[in-house]
Image (cartoon, helix red, strand yellow):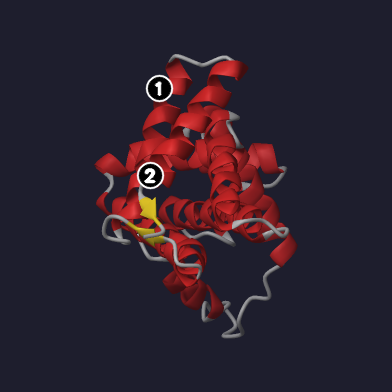
C-alpha cells in the first residue's frame, strides 16, 4: 500500500484518456472519505466494500474508483484522515488557553481518552484498520508510519514545551509517547468489552494522569 504522500503525488499526475489531468472535486473526495470513515466505524472493514460505500455515499462504484483506484488506496487515505483529525484535536487541547504545563498534559490526556471511550468515529475506524493490518503488510507499514508521526507530534509539541519549563522525563523521551498511547489503547480495548461507569472512568483517568505525571521530574 502506498503512503498517503505517495498517493497524493500519484493522484496529481494521473492523466485522463485525452492526456489532460482530471479535475477532481475536493468536496466530493472529502464526502467519500467522511462516508468511508463512518462506514468502517459502524460496520467494520467487512461492511465497507466499494459497493456498500457507493450506496452510503449516494454514488456509483465507478464514482469511487474515479478518486481511489483501489481499496488499498482508499484505506490509506482513511488512515491518514483519521490521524489528521485526532492529532488536530489533541494538539488544540494541549495548546489552547493559558494553562500550567502539567494541566496541559492532563487536558490532552482527557481528550485522548475521550476519543477512545466515547467511540469517536475516527478512533473506531483506526481500531478496525489496526486489526486488519495484522494480515496486511502494506497497511501495517502505513499504520506504523502514522503511529510514528503521532509520537513525534507528542514530542515536538508536548515534551519540548515541558523541557523549556524545566520539566524533564525520567525515562528516554522517545518512550514517553509510546507508553502513553499504549496505555490508553490497551485500556480502551478493555473498556470496549467491559465498560466502566462514568465515575469509574473519571477515577481511571485520574490514575492515568498520576502514572504519566510520574514519568516527569523538575529536579
Name the residue: 68% across, 75% down: 23
Q: Nearer the viewer, residue 149 or 173?
A: 173
> Which label was assigned to residue 34?
none
Q: Nearer the viewer, residue 124 or 180?
A: 180
Name the residue: 55% across, 78% down: 12
| Tally of numbered tags | 2
Q: Residue 34: percent from the left, percent from the top?
A: 65, 48
Q: Residue 118: percent from the left, percent from the top?
A: 60, 30
- Establish if 141 lies above or below 201: below
| Quadrant into which the C terminus falls | bottom left
Q: Residue 199: percent from the left, percent from the top?
A: 60, 17
Residue position marked by numbered label 1 in the rendering: 190
Q: Nearer the viewer, residue 178 or 165?
A: 165
Residue position marked by numbered label 2 in the rendering: 214
* 169 horizontally vs 62: left or right: left
Q: Secondary structure at mark 1?
A: helix
Amino acid at each position: 500500500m502506498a503512503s498517503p504522500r505517495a498517493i497524493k503525488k500519484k493522484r496529481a499526475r494521473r492523466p485522463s484518456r485525452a492526456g489532460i489531468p482530471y479535475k477532481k472535486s475536493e468536496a466530493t473526495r472529502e464526502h467519500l472519505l467522511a462516508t468511508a470513515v463512518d462506514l468502517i466505524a459502524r460496520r467494520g472493514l467487512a461492511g465497507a466494500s466499494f459497493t456498500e460505500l457507493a450506496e452510503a455515499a449516494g454514488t456509483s462504484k465507478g464514482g469511487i474508483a474515479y478518486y481511489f483506484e483501489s481499496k488499498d488506496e482508499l484505506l490509506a487515505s482513511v488512515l491518514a484522515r483519521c490521524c489528521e483529525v485526532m492529532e488536530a484535536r489533541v494538539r488544540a487541547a494541549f495548546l489552547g488557553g493559558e494553562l500550567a504545563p502539567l494541566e496541559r498534559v492532563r487536558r490532552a490526556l482527557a481528550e485522548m481518552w475521550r476519543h477512545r471511550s466515547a467511540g469517536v468515529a475516527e478512533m473506531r475506524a483506526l481500531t478496525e484498520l489496526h486489526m486488519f493490518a495484522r494480515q496486511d503488510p502494506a497497511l501495517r507499514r502505513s499504520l506504523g508510519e502514522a503511529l510514528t508521526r503521532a509520537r513525534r507530534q507528542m514530542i515536538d509539541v508536548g515534551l519540548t514545551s515541558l523541557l523549556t519549563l524545566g520539566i524533564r522525563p525520567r525515562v528516554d523521551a522517545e518512550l514517553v509517547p509510546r507508553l502513553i498511547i499504549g496505555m490508553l489503547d490497551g485500556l480502551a480495548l478493555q473498556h470496549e468489552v467491559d465498560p466502566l461507569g462514568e465515575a469509574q472512568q473519571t477515577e481511571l483517568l485520574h490514575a492515568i494522569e498520576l502514572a504519566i505525571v510520574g514519568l516527569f521530574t523538575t529536579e
